[in-house]
Amino acid sequence: MKRNKVSLNEILNGSLLSVMFKLGGPVMIAGIFETVYNLADTFWLGHLPQGESGNAVAGLQLAFPIIWFLISFAAGFAMAGIALVSQYTGAQKEDKASFSASQVLSIGFISGLILGIIGSIFVPIFMPIITPVHELSDVAITYLRVIFMGFPFMFISFIFRAILSAYGDTVTPMYVIGFSNLLNIILDPILIFGIGPFPKMGIVGAAVATVFSRFVASLISLYILVGGKKGIKVKLSYLKPHIDWLKKIFKIGLPASIGNSFEAFGFVVLMGIIGRLPNAKVAVAAYGIGDRIFSLSYIAEDGLGQGLTTIIGQSLGANRVDRADYAAKRGILLLFLVLIVESLFIIIFRRQLMSLFIPNELSIIEEGARFLLLFAPALSLFGIIRGIISAFNASGHNVPPMIISMVRLWALRVPLSYIFGFVIGMGSSGVWIAMSLSNLFTAIFALILFARGEWKKKVIEETAQRL
């Protein structure tokens, strides 16, 4: 049953805006669920008693870059899956698309298991380095130890979403993610505050709710893929790693993994800079809540960006370079304009948005409002960056996105944040300004790479392996 799939003919010949919204709409809805899940953690932890709430929210924010750093490896393999599945689908070779998906899923599960173990061992060593405030690092370590137990399930869910979206079915992942996040949202207050027979678990309750909901999502994802009712069919024989295909996946996915990991580690270092500001607790908590608010603006950007990736990938697979070129240029412009509107909304309602999440901490509200004001103008520039990365991901050329990520974080955001925050002595405001400047210069750099046209070359021509 493939009724959720947008047809190849429509992707290649339909109205670009219509197809982007058909593919991206379900991703946006799934993104709403995902964002509400993240916001729910912050919201409920922010409503713990005064003092405890600030530590919990700050600890949660300290943990997220570590999670992102390790899960970035799955993102790289997912990018390989997107390139191969979308291009084989465009070439109408669905058996190879299923085989590619199976190989990527197998690698993802094994990677999640290994990285979860590594994270559990090393996080107590590295977290105190990020911030010298022990009350914050201890909370973050407690949260992460539970999260790492669920890493294999997170990887499966992440790759499942990428695989079906590349195939043209963004509706099914929306349902799975929606159900999983709804389950998490229901469990959050029960476990955090101790409702009914459950004891009060605080931030540990938020972690347990996340792991359990991702476990359920992974079971549903495997059931769908093994059943093959959505077009992509995972077979046990396909899950056995094949060396030739592993080389292909690593060739495509490793640059994305490295790029994502370096970007994520850049945010770990950035968190270390914020964690050493004179007002560390206030700054980290304000940044954490502000980051969740900005995540609302990324819903449309992620959805439309995923739709754009599918259109470009399948167009290249069908040798419709003209369609891919048209989609890329119009898609980048659309992402830019959408984020302009959203950034204006955030600027206008910045204080109300902050106080919604942590009503009892006035200093955090004021610092967060300042962060939103200084960074929101640069938000729209990320639409340009995201659109260009979508084009490269669709084609399977992931070295340029890796370079873009490294430039954004390591050449710009991290050093500028340190210089503005500590050398010049602007404190937290300097860090927020540096973040804005990093988006500006990165957008210019990404446009230069995009203009070279390397993203118009597909990768499936190089695949000569037999199933």
Image (tube, rainbow, N blue to C red):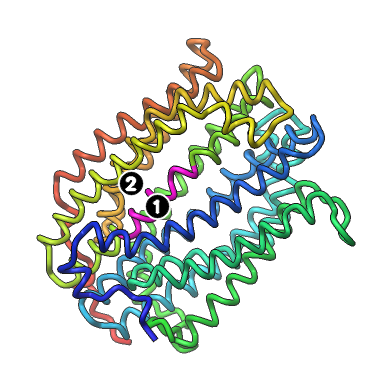
Judge by depth and name the residue closer to the eye, 28 or 134.
28
Q: Is residue 137 left or right of residue 175?
A: right
Identify the secondary structure beneath mark 2: helix
Disc on res. 253: none
Identify residue for label 1: 302
Disc on res. 386: 2
> Magenta segment, which residues?
295-307
Q: Indicate the quadrant where residue 26 lies.
A: bottom left
x then y, percent, for residue 94: 30, 83
Q: Amino acid at mark 2?
A: Arg
Could you tell me which residue is drawn at 42 percent across and 35 percent down?
409
Could you tell me which residue is drawn at 40 percent across and 31 percent down?
344
Could you tell me which residue is drawn at 49 percent across and 75 percent down?
106
Q: Is residue 286 left or right of residue 466?
A: right
Identify the secondary structure beneath mark 1: helix
Q: Amino acid at mark 1?
A: Asp
Q: Earlier in the sequence, mark 1 or mark 2?
A: 1
- 166 lies above or below 408: below
x then y, percent, for residue 12: 17, 69
Judge by depth and name the residue closer to the eye, 2 or 133.
2
Q: Is residue 414 left or right of residue 13?
A: right
**Is residue 305 rendered magenta in the image?**
yes
